[in-house]
Image (cartoon, rainbow, N blue to C red):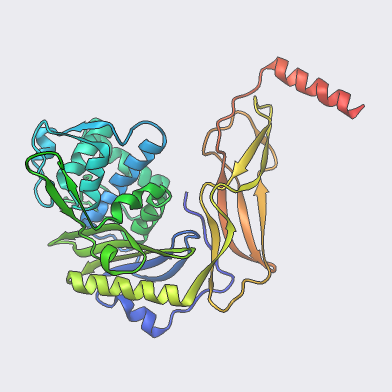
Amino acid sequence: MVPTVAWAKEPTPSKSVTDMAASAKSAILMDADSGTVIYEKNSNAALPPASITKIMTMLLVMEAIDEGRLKLTDKVQTSEYAASMGGSQIFLEPGEEMTVEEMLKGVALASGNDASVALAEKLGGSEQQFVAMMNEKAEQLGMKNTKFANCNGLPAEGHVSSARDIAIMSRELLKYEGITKYTGLYQDYLRKSSPKPFWLVNTNKLVRFYNGADGLKTGFTSEAKFCLSATARRNNMRLIAVVMGEPNTKTRNAEVSHLFDYAFAQYTNIPIYKKGDSIGTLSVEKGKIDKIPLTAKHSYSVLLKKGDAGKGIRHELVLDPAVKAPVEIGQPIGKLVVYRGADILTEFPVESPLAVSRAGWWTLLRRATGQLFLSD
């Protein structure tokens, strides 16, 4: 879930910031850790996203790998339908096999429409079923202006997204840190050991020319024009910039670079927790496990203007007072609230990292008896 972010004082971009995406139909600049929006322009407009669609395709693949439903070494066989995709492609032949990792490279670097469909069929059984999974995930993430009709972004009626929604799914994809191993590559080869190796060059030139850039996805169709969801990291701050409907690649890259330059110059992140840090313990009534240790699933931080030392920053873990078994994995159980003085800066949702079933009567009796003796 994407946390609700509230500033103690709303930032007011200068006119120069407002003009930074002057040529884009829609744009947004977001801090990836906190979800804080630094700048936006028509960010909720539903527009054709072209190949930026593939961010959701990659997200579902990375999620499946993380959950053990898919391995990078698994073989993916290309169907005739996948091989028939036009536009950007890695020229898969019907029946050709590649690993999930090779297909991911084909999507991340070359924006392969054929590789996207092959992965969709591997994971969903069919592209149609995979698209249903995409739309379900979009709904879970709160992407209110998005409707997917395919997994690759080829023009289709009703296939739309918005800059804000794209930033949300980009942020979710970046939680799987391994993805930038592919999206941050400038070039690589497929079919290295074959007589016809295929050279991949990243369609996102910022990964070569902008300091800290390591993703995520470009897009172009004659309807969508030039689109980009870009990410860059410097020190402890990662940014996401999305522009849609740009007139050409030069303008697209320049405006994203200006947005990044502004944020890196003006803002800094104050860390609250690093990924893996202990953040507290959840008590579960009548559960097989009565206490769940909670650790940070990702880094937690707040975004502040440089020069603001972050004095008076404090945080509090607020858990639901009576969580009873059964508890589902990912179930909301509370929130991490960050304050400056009495003002709330940010609230991060906290979810259960484990599923906890209800304890049997014997376990509950033994637990109660133990507590009785302890009370004596």
- Judge left or right: residue 145 versus residue 318: left
- Judge left or right: residue 270 versus residue 376: left
Residue under the point 52% across and 35% down: 329
Can see residue 256? yes
- Judge left or right: residue 79 versus residue 320: left
The x and y percentages for residue 39 are: 41, 72
Number of marks in the rendered image? 0
Residue under the point 53% across and 50% down: 275
- Judge left or right: residue 246 versus residue 137: left
Q: Quadrant of residue 79?
A: top left
Q: Quadrant of residue 62?
A: top left
The x and y percentages for residue 222 are: 12, 62
The residue most toward the bottom is 15
Q: Is residue 14 above or below residue 95?
A: below
Residue under the point 27% across and 40% down: 101
Residue under the point 73% across and 21% down: 364
The x and y percentages for residue 2 are: 47, 53
Q: Quadrant of residue 376?
A: top right
The residue most toward the top is 362
Q: Is residue 181 above or below residue 222?
A: above
The x and y percentages for residue 160 are: 25, 55
User: 1 or 196: nearer the eye?
Assistant: 196
User: 268 or 21: nearer the eye?
Assistant: 268
Can see residue 128? no
The residue most toward the right is 376
